[in-house]
Image (tube, coloured by chain):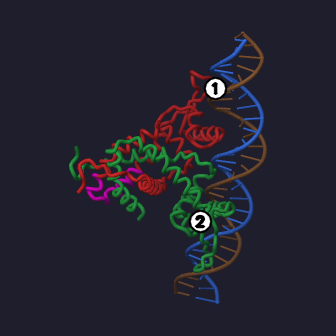
Chain colours: A green, B red, C brown, D blue
Amino acid sequence: MEPKTNLSELNVSDFAMVFEELTRIFIRMPSIEKLSFTTLSVLHTLSLRSPMRLSELIATKQVTQSAITQLVTRLERDGLVECRPDPSDGRAVLVHITPQGAGVIDSRRSERIMRIAKLIAGLSPEERGAIASALPALTRLAQLGNT
Amino acid sequence: MEPKTNLSELNVSDFAMVFEELTRIFIRMPSIEKLSFTTLSVLHTLSLRSPMRLSELIATKQVTQSAITQLVTRLERDGLVECRPDPSDGRAVLVHITPQGAGVIDSRRSERIMRIAKLIAGLSPEERGAIASALPALTRLAQLGNT
DNA sequence: GCAACTTATATAAATATCTAATATATATCC
DNA sequence: GGATATATATTAGATATTTATATAAGTTGC
């Protein structure tokens, strides 16, 4: 049906729309934990790289420094992160994610994977193949976005 | 390089990871408007279908009925939505998105499309083709998720 | 056709979270 | 070493959210 190397042009609007839809679908995750969006966002960031300075966390989230300080204080109270001084800078604080904090993110990730798996099961082998073939390109897209 | 119909199996974890990364990248949208995540989420839902009952909005967001009522009151005060009685049910309220409310979502969507376009420009034609070939399957995935 | 129940939304008070302003301690730069 | 910059903390006030309760309109069984 299709040529070996598919050079059909990619419609950005279409891609954005599909992506928007998929995001909308997967964002509503029941999850038992009652954690706010900002809280989960900070934990997620730390799950990718820990420890991080408060100032680094502020840079990614669009909230004030004060909000992050208070949020991290609550997260520490709940045992999801742990703050320690930065040996190389006496002013700084290094926020470490705890196993419990990582567990929150991991369990949400597992839950999401299961939901996606169920949907993917409804696709044809050809459709699954098409998505699989696009994964390397999508991965590179994400890399480009991280710079 | 690849067979005509690619039946290589799709690794759900890999897909979920890429998707998670892309979401993380596109979620931090500076946008001038200072609207909370929940606020944008309600507006976005209404941009896809309007009017909607309060109770329908509650079903999608994970907040209490009270929170939605108050949020919609604020949105109405700001001219982003308009509430009208439901002729078929005297108890119900139909929340309509206003042109101004739709404008907020549209401008964010345009902004996102521009950001995605910039990233896509960094891909090779083959990579763009691979993503384009996966769009129909991704669209169907979203459809499956909506049921 | 009405009493009991359910459904849809509103309100009030308590709590949680956020912003703005300011303070404090450590680093850095002449 | 003093001036300035940087990293975080604190405080107070504004905003948003939950919990519990209220109100009003629909539905059901009799």
The residue beneath circle 2 is A97
**Residues at marks 1 and 2, CA–CA distance in whole angstroms:** 47 Å
Neighbourhood count class around disc 1 (C-alpha, 10 Å): few under 14, some 14–19, many 20 upward: few
State the residue in front, A121 or A99: A121
Q: Is residue B12 above or below residue B81?
A: below
Residue A98, which numbered label?
Answer: none
Q: Is residue B123 visible?
A: yes
Q: Is residue B32 magenta?
A: no
* Residue B121 point in image, percent of width and height: 31, 57
Residue B86 appears in which quarter of the rendering?
Answer: top right
Q: Nearer the viewer, mark 1 or mark 2?
A: 2
Give the residue at x 52% y 41%. B43
Q: Which residue is mark 1?
A: B91
Q: Secondary structure at mark 1?
A: strand
* Picture coordinates of residue A123, whole percent (x, y): 38, 42
Mark 2 Cα shell of 10 Å, populated few (<14), some (14-19), many (≥20): many
Q: Quadrant of residue B63?
A: top right
Q: Position of residue B128 (x, y in %)?
A: 29, 53
* Residue B30 visible in this rendered orientation of the protein: no
Q: Quadrant where the N terminus of chain A lies? A: top left
The residue most toward the left is: A3
Image coordinates for residue D12, horizontal then vertical, percent: 74, 59
Tag 1: amino acid: Arg
Q: Is residue B126 magenta?
A: yes
The residue lying toward the viewer, choosing from C17 and A130, is A130
Give whichever of A62, A9 is nearer the camera: A9
The chain identifier of the residue carrying mark 1 reads B
**Which portion, as a residue range, is magenta?**
B112-129
